[in-house]
Image (tube, coloured by chain):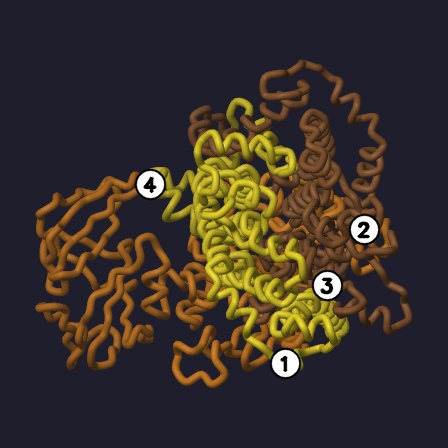
């Protein structure tokens, strides 16, 4: 179990000039010992690169990686004592489950009795005690992933367990089982776990803190509520949530907020910088009022979808499509109706150049 | 420690490459000498360098037509072999059907039959069909061992592609031909490359059947060269030059499929 | 992940039909002819006598056949013992990518593309003391090397020629198999602290099992049928030291024009190979079935 500190950047070419030359833009980050973290972002955002740098499979082009204060940048994964679970199960086909789990310990010349004890304990934790003597090659994908995970856990001094989209090949109805198992293990063993995924549900349910990344940059680190309530970056607002945040371009001038052709008085509210801004509000917090108050925007309802637990109302404002969530019991508007959108509220966020205005 | 092991492997590789090239170098060496020099003295490189042997081959129709004939029937054979092997390999890889294991093994047995066994029967068969001394005859005769090999190789590569990819394509509305050509084939590029290479190879080098089924019009280079050997005085120099030239088409083919052989195929990265 | 068992679909036969047609045409008709000849004594085009198994019995009693068969088995075993490990070792030492990989690939594969009679000729020259690199230097070193006079030397030369000629086949197949192993396996092995030998034994070798089976079968079959190269190199000599089965058959069929016995022997020859391959095939299949299905999972 270790505390991991990153202070690095990783570029594709020798002399990076622009942002595009970097796989990971310069960053500093700390992963506390025993914490469960998720690296969340779309394909190509750099999350797997960051993971591989932490595990030692990749060397950063500049900067350092520290485990418990020790510089491990030049050390191999074996020397860093990490465990990694890959996208597809990686097991030794010719060995039994027990032999698979024992393999890392055998290579370290751990005495046989201790091996047996560790293997038994981990197998029990993974609910695979009855399969110890079966050939690993004949098992299902989720069981194989458990073996992959087990090989990492079997070492008592493993510094961190890194996951690279491990549920990719698992059947959907088994995914939640594995997720739950991971949480159990985290609770029991208190290991540092770092989980890479592009699925926000996985990230938000698994991790204590989520690192949201895009195009080589970590744009926000924080627990699920922070990411939801106060996205620090328009990307976070857009990526998190289903659907993501609504964004309206606005212009602030002397206490007046210009949105499309409307002007809303904001002088009494928070202090906003002048100039072009982006207003962000989540569908959950976009209120539809029937009558127009002074700080609402009129919009046309395009369609209303009954999702089951809520209604999704899509409105058109100018050439923007905005979505709002309504409770199924509320009086739903009809397509074609004019509604008044209350965009200002406690949950509204303002962004300048994509970054949150505090 | 890794450095040391790396060095051992490189040394081993270099040693093997020398072993591989030595006889070829010797043949190239001979191809630039005159017969006189070959028989009279022993030299590591030509004392009297000459292009004459190659000139003979390029200007004498009985020599260069041999190359062209060989290329023709090899090309025909490779195309047919791959065309029929692909769907069959797909069937073996994806489905079970009545007698599938037996048919698969039967195909392999054809690869196991010594060509000598078929000398006489083939001779009679093709004479009856009026196909003696044609390119298509040799191409068809070579199907006997190339098609099973192609099916075998392709099936191995296809089985490595998860069936989920096929299923996803059908769910996405792909018709079978469209799926096969736009999705599946690119995934097994390595397999197609390897199969094509082996079809080319075994057809190009085969002597017995090619010589038996041809006489003049479709006479392949391998038969022309044996003529040299059976001539009264061994024409080592021209033989060497002809030998060197037989390696050229093969080297080109390897060069084209090298990526497919080297890259293999990716697992599930659709 | 969906099931690893394949669905039953009889319509798959249509996909297989073209292959069957092509191969059956080239195989079944001639084979029938051979069977036909093997049970008849053809004295002239009009006079054919059915002789049943007479030819088979005669052939089996033939001392020459026993000699050739024994030599052939020894040769094929030697070939497998040398070429399979050597090919694997070569594949392991070949670079995985870059221009070096392509260059090495071309050089290694070259010997496969040389017509077999030329291979024989190359080594015939190579081994001669007067005009050959090998022969000349061996003589200079005081070693009285002669593949035409000394049976043992002839054997070693034929073996060396075959190794030189065909090891690249094993190497290329093994190489393709190696390239298909995803990096993650090597990474996981490194994380698990596995030694290079463990990586070979537990990851590379198992994953190469499919291609190695192809290699073993191909090399066995082809070495058992070998004709051109040794014929050109030694002519089967000295004496009959390097006369293998195919040459025995061809001499009988073409040289002595004993079509009956030749046809009978052809069938026996064929069945011997068939038997060996059937056994080998099943043995390797049983080793690999669970592994093969698992690799789809």
**Left or right: where A336 falls relative to C214:** left
Which label lies toward us, 4 or 3?
3
The residue lying at 64 percent from left, 56 percent from top is B231
Q: Colour of chain B?
A: yellow
**Residue A39: x %, y % from top left:** 49, 63
Q: Callout 3: helix, strand or loop?
A: helix
* Residue behind mark 4: B174
**Residue A333: x %, y % from top left:** 14, 45
Rendering quarter of residue A292: bottom left
The residue lying at 86 percent from left, 73 percent from top is C140
**Residue B39: x %, y % from top left:** 72, 71
Q: Which chain is brown?
A: C
Q: Chain of mark 2?
A: A
**Left or right: where B61 falls relative to C134:** left
Q: Can residue A32 be seen at all in this image of the molecule?
A: no
Q: Callout 1: helix, strand or loop?
A: loop
């Amino acid at each position: 179990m270790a505390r991991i500190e990153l202070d690095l950047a990783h570029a594709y070419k020798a002399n990076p000039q622009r942002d595009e030359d970097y796989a990971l833009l310069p960053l500093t980050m700390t992963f506390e010992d025993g914490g469960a973290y998720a690296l969340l972002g779309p394909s190509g955002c750099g999350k797997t690169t960051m993971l591989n740098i932490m595990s030692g499979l990749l060397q950063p082009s500049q900067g350092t990686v520290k485990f418990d204060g020790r510089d491990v940048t030049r050390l191999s994964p074996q020397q860093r004592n990490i465990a990694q679970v890959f996208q597809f199960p990686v097991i030794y086909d010719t060995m039994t489950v027990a032999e698979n789990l024992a393999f890392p310990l055998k290579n370290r010349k751990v005495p046989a009795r201790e091996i047996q004890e560790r293997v038994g304990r981990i197998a029990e934790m993974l609910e695979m005690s009855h399969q110890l003597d079966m050939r690993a090659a004949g098992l299902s994908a989720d069981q194989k992933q458990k073996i992959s995970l087990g090989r990492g856990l079997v070492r008592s001094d493993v510094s961190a367990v890194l996951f690279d989209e491990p549920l990719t090949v698992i059947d959907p109805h088994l995914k939640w089982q594995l997720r739950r198992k991971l949480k159990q293990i985290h609770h029991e063993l208190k290991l540092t776990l770092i989980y890479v995924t592009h699925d926000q549900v996985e990230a938000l349910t698994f991790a204590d803190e989520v690192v949201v990344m895009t195009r080589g940059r970590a744009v926000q680190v924080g627990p699920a509520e922070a990411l939801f309530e106060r996205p620090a970056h328009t990307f976070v607002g857009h990526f998190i949530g289903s659907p993501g945040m609504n964004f309206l371009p606005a212009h602030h001038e002397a206490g007046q907020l210009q949105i499309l052709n409307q002007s809303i008085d904001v002088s009494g509210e928070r202090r906003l910088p002048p100039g072009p801004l982006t207003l962000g509000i989540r569908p959950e917090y976009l209120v539809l009022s029937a009558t127009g108050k002074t700080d609402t925007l009129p919009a046309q309802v395009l369609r209303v979808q009954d999702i089951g637990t809520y209604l999704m109302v899509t409105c058109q404002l100018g050439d923007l499509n905005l979505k709002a969530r309504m409770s199924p019991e509320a009086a739903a508007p009809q397509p074609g109706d004019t509604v008044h959108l209350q965009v200002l509220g406690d949950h509204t966020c303002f962004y300048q150049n994509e970054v949150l205005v505090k | 420690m890794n450095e040391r092991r790396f060095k051992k492997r490189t040394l081993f590789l270099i040693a093997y490459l020398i072993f591989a090239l030595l006889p070829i170098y010797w043949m190239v060496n001979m191809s630039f000498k005159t017969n006189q020099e070959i028989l009279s003295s022993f030299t590591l490189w030509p004392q009297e360098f000459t292009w004459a042997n190659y000139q003979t081959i390029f200007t004498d129709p009985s020599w260069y037509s041999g190359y062209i004939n060989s290329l023709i029937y090899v090309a025909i054979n490779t195309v047919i072999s791959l065309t029929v092997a692909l769907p069959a390999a797909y069937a073996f890889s994806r489905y079970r059907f009545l007698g599938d294991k037996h048919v698969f093994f039967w195909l392999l047995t054809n690869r196991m039959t010594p060509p000598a066994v078929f000398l006489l029967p083939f001779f009679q068969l093709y004479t009856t069909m009026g196909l003696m001394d044609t390119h298509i005859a040799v191409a068809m005769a070579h199907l006997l061992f190339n098609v099973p090999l192609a099916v075998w190789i392709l099936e191995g590569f296809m089985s490595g592609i998860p069936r989920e990819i096929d299923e996803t394509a059908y769910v996405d509305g792909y018709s079978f031909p469209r799926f096969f050509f736009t999705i599946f084939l690119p995934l097994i590029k390595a397999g197609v490359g390897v199969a094509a290479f082996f079809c080319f190879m075994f057809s190009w080098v085969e002597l017995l059947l090619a010589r038996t089924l041809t006489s003049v019009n479709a006479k392949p280079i391998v038969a022309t060269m044996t003529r040299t050997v059976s001539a009264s005085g061994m024409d080592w120099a021209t033989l060497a030059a002809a030998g060197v030239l037989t390696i050229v088409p093969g080297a080109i083919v390897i060069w084209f499929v090298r990526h497919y052989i080297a890259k293999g195929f990716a697992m599930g990265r659709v | 992940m969906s099931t690893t068992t394949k669905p039953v679909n009889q319509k798959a036969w249509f996909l297989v039909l073209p292959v069957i047609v092509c191969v059956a045409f080239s195989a079944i008709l001639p084979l029938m002819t051979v069977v036909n000849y093997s049970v008849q004594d053809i004295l002239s085009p009009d006079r054919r006598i059915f002789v049943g198994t007479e030819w088979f019995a005669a052939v089996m009693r033939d001392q020459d056949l026993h000699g050739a068969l024994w030599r052939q088995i020894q040769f094929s075993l030697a070939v497998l013992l040398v070429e399979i490990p050597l090919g694997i070792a070569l594949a392991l030492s070949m670079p995985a990518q870059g221009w070096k990989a392509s260059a090495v690939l071309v050089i290694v594969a070259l010997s496969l593309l040389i017509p077999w009679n030329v291979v024989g000729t190359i080594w015939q020259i190579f081994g001669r003391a007067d005009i050959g690199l090998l022969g000349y230097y061996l003589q200079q070193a005081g070693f009285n090397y002669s593949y035409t006079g000394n049976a043992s030397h002839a054997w070693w030369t034929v073996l060396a020629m075959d190794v030189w000629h065909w090891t690249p086949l094993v190497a290329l197949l093994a190489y393709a198999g190696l390239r298909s192993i995803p990096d993650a396996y090597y990474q996981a092995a490194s994380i698990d602290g596995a030694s290079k030998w463990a990586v070979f034994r537990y990851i590379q070798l198992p994953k190469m099992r499919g291609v190695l089976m192809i290699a073993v079968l191909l090399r066995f079959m082809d070495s058992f049928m070998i004709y051109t190269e040794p014929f050109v190199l030694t002519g089967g000599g000295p004496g009959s030291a390097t006369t293998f089965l195919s040459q025995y058959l061809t001499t009988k069929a073409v040289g002595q024009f004993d079509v009956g016995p030749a046809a009978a022997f052809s069938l026996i020859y064929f069945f011997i190979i068939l038997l060996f391959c059937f056994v080998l095939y099943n043995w390797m299949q049983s080793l690999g079935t669970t592994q093969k299905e698992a690799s789809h999972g």
